[in-house]
Image: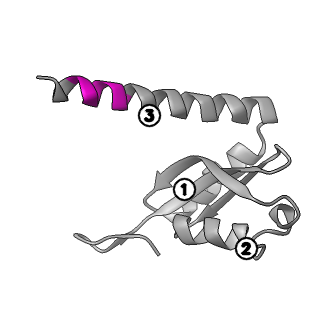
Amino acid sequence: MLMNKKIGKVFNYVYILRCADGTLYTGWTNNLDERIKIHNVGAGAKYTRSRLPVELVYQETFDNKKLALKREFEIKKLTKTQKEKLITLQHCEIFQVSENKNAFTDI
């Protein structure tokens, strides 16, 4: 389990994996790194076992399992196109934060 060592808090994650065949798989876990490893050795969800390797393309972090499961359900109802937009938006946000961070290193 991933924990914030300072406060001993367990986080819950909703994630989207891109499978080798281009399909997307959505799940939740409280140990994201370990869960992806499990998927990639073929011991994860039945859906991903025949679609290896998988790659993490999206994640959200929650303080509790209930909220994570609710969000997982919401994402699973989205179309593939809507999920791709969600992935793209998150990547754009990360790029913008990274770009802004680099701007401050030049000061």
Q: Secondary structure at mark 3?
A: helix
Answer few, some or many: residues within 10 Å of disc 2's Cα (few below 14, many 20 plus, some between 14 and 19).
few
- Is the residue 54 above or below the residue 78 in the image? below
- If you read the primary sequence from the N terminus, does the residue marked by circle 3 or circle 1 appear first? 1
Applied colour scheme: one colour
Which residue, given by chain and number where applicable, does mark 3 sit on?
Answer: 94
The chief SS type of the magenta part is helix
- If you read the primary sequence from the N terminus, does the residue marked by circle 2 or circle 1 appear first? 2
Quadrant of the rendered structure where residue 4 is? bottom left
Q: Position of residue 71 (x, y in %)?
A: 62, 49
Q: Say which of 18 and 31 sits in front.
A: 18
Q: Position of residue 47 (x, y in %)?
A: 85, 62
On residue 67, the disc is: 1
Task: Please say if the residues under marks 3 and 1 sit with CB atoms less than 8 Å apart.
Answer: no
Distance CA(mark 3)–CA(mark 1): 23 Å
Residue type, label 2: Val
Dividing the image into 4 quarters, which one contains the C terminus? top left
Which residue, given by chain and number where applicable, does mark 2 sit on?
Answer: 41
- Is the residue 67 above or below the residue 101 in the image? below
Residue placed furthest toward the front: 106
Give the magenta range.
97-103
Q: Secondary structure at mark 1?
A: helix
Say which residue appears at 66% left-offset and 52% top-offset. 55
Say which residue appears at 67% left-offset and 73% top-offset. 38
Say which residue appears at 61% left-offset and 29% top-offset. 88
Answer few, some or many: residues within 10 Å of disc 1's Cα (few below 14, many 20 plus, some between 14 and 19).
some
Q: Secondary structure at mark 2?
A: loop
